[in-house]
Amino acid sequence: MNSVVESEIGQVDRILILGWGLIGDLFIRIPLIEALKDRFPHAAITVVVDPPSVAVLENHPACDQVIAFSREKRPLIKYVARFVALALRLRNADFNLCINLYCGGSSPWITWLSNADIRISFDHTPALRWSNNLMVPRPSFCNNWTLDFARMLRPLGISSNKILRGAHFYCSEEAKHFAKALLLSRGQQLIAINLGAGADEKRWPVARFVELAMKVNHGYGIRPLVFTNPGMESLADEFVEQYSGDVVHVPLLSLDKVAALMQHCDYVISGDTALMHLAFALKRPTLVLFTHTRPEPVAPVGVHYVSCFVEGHCETDPCGNLMGTVDIPLDEVYRQFCNLVRFTSNVNDGLQVSLKGKKNDQ
């Protein structure tokens, strides 16, 4: 069915991207959106996402329109009404190119109903094969996930070496002003701490976060800034109760405002969650506790980043690699944080020397 010709690709000026999934899933796909904008600079790009993910792209210069579509099927009559409305809206937009980066659920139907001239996806299901006219063999996803998804863009003349392993996030001016006002009197260095995780068994204990924050404060004089996670508000309260020093306790905020505050932090500590991907996108020096998932699929480039990962003994991922365990020793986490500080300082010192050299040459 790969009947698309080069002349059709050259005429692309309206691009539809199906990008459903968790917030972290969308961050992994952002480099592809950026690469598409570079390949088709005059094209208008529309991305369909789950409602919570709108904030990831609403200020991104590579994205011209973000459409929120909830995949919640209860009550069914409302879902059908939303589905029909979305299909009609996309069909009327007359897209040249549709790229299905979600691949599951009803996305093949949306792809087909969009009536885009070029429809790209992987080829691993019958539904994807009949709904698309330009297909790419599905990769194993045993390597970096961004680069695996990037294979879908090869027929468009976008090679994998043009894809950055790392997204970008853009804060609104309102969020920047909010963060500046909140932290106006905070002269001390800050370390952002994200306590949340998808499930209780994947969460490093709050008590260990507290001990780590105390060691960091004692060793470096850095004060913790603790984010509040939706549905897990008690974690931040627990941290504040146990920590003996001064804490910046951040209430539940929009992703935009969280990002603006994170930009003021010198370091970030997080598990493998949406805020980890946000820290990567903001290029903040980040220490990640991989308590279940492995670091290799999401490891970014262009970010000062270290990981803490201890293999478990039983559970394996689809590629046969051992998954992690939540039992990561405190001393190991602190050691890795010291490595992050040292690495970041060395790079910054080297940059300052380089800039001084250029100034003297002028």
Image: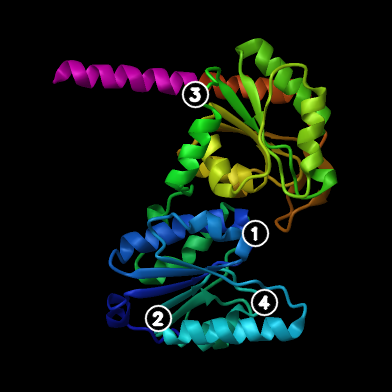
Q: Earlier in the sequence, mark 4 or mark 1?
A: 1
For disc 1, the neighbor class at 10 Å (few under 14, some 14 to 19, many from 20) is some
The circle on residue 105 is 4
N-term-proximal mark, 2 vs 3: 2
Residue matched to label 3: 344
Res 355 label: none
Q: Which of marks 4 and 1 is in front?
A: 1
Residue under numbered circle 2: 95
Q: Is mark 2 on a helix, strand or loop?
A: loop
- Of pointers 2 and 1, the one earlier in the residue sequence: 1
Magenta part of the chain: 345-362
Q: Which mark is residue 22?
A: 1
SS class, disc 4: loop
Above or below — where is 145 with respect to 187?
below
Marks 3 and 1, how far apart in space? 30 Å
Q: What residue type is labelled 2?
A: Phe
- Residue 16: x %, y % from top left: 45, 74
